[in-house]
Image: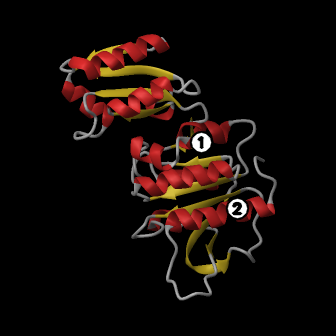
Amino acid sequence: MVSPKDRFLTVYGRKPVLEALADPDLEVDKVILADTARGPAATEILRAARASGVAVQRASAHRVKVLAGNGKQDQGVLADVVAPRMRPLADVLAGRRPPERVLVLDGITTPANVGMILRTATAAGLGGIVVPRRGVAALDPLVVKASAGVAFRAPVLRCATAAEAAERLTESGYAMFALGASGQSLFEAELPRRAAFVLGGETAGVSEEVAELATGWLSIPMPGDVESLNVAAAAAVLCFDLVRRFSPGE
């Protein structure tokens, strides 16, 4: 059975929920409204949901906080938005045509970085972006905002941890390349068509468990006097070098 976390992006707060309900390109599965929510704001949400044909469930304020995963900003309401390209990693790897090239996010905890990576990788036509449920920023309104809404239709692949993703991908025949400050130049490396590229966290970089499974390390040449790039910037360089090498969308 597929977990709801592998089917929906959950947005919370009055404005994000109203925006999701008003967007004709999005399919909202349901709205959950705290039973303590009253007044004009709650009325507006109920009216918008009714106009869109979306069911509204009532729940305790505590339950809404738990489901939103954010106790300060949910404002007593959340919506589950269908993410049509989101799939469990295991299902995709077992399918007939798994993607040739995927990104793996490993310990990236800043929502803005996750959102920008989703936008960039989707624009570059990558077939999958592994966003583990643990160790990476939750796919929440901050990520959606940073992606400029692309997160809803990004090819997100879900699993528990980056280490699990690395193991599954390796077992499925993917070469595993980690990006770091040292390693072979990205622009000079020979890359197989079937490969996974690991982007490490903002502070710690690629985790030890994932690094142990790496086929090799790649670095982005920087002739200027700068130690490293922001991980979202590094992802952009990588993704569009892959566009240069391969036809997107394969």
Q: Give the CA separation, mark 1 to mark 2.
A: 16 Å
Residue 119 position within the rendered picture, expressed as x and y whole percent measured from the top left: 58, 50
Residue type marked 2: Phe
Is 38 or 191 nearer to us in this picture? 38
Q: Where 64 falls versus 216 (above or below)?
A: above
Residue 193 position within the rendered picture, expressed as x and y whole percent measured from the top left: 77, 58
Residue 42 position within the rendered picture, expressed as x and y whole percent measured from the top left: 28, 19
Colouring of the image = secondary structure
Element type at mark 2: helix
Q: Left or right: 30 with respect to 156?
A: left
Q: Residue at x 48, y 15 (%)?
A: 52
Q: Quadrant of residue 95?
A: top right
Q: Left or right: 95 with respect to 29?
A: right
Q: Residue at x 63, y 56 (%)?
A: 170
Q: Residue furthest front?
A: 40
Q: Quadrant of residue 68?
A: top left
Q: Residue at x 55, y 55 (%)?
A: 117
Q: Which residue is mark 2?
A: 240
**Which disc is residue 154 wearing?**
1
Element type at mark 1: loop
Residue type marked 1: Ala
Which circle's residue, 1 or 2, is located before the other in the chain?
Answer: 1
Q: Where 167 falls versus 59 (above or below)?
A: below
For the question of whether residue 135 can be seen, the reply is: yes
Residue 184 position within the rendered picture, expressed as x and y whole percent measured from the top left: 66, 79
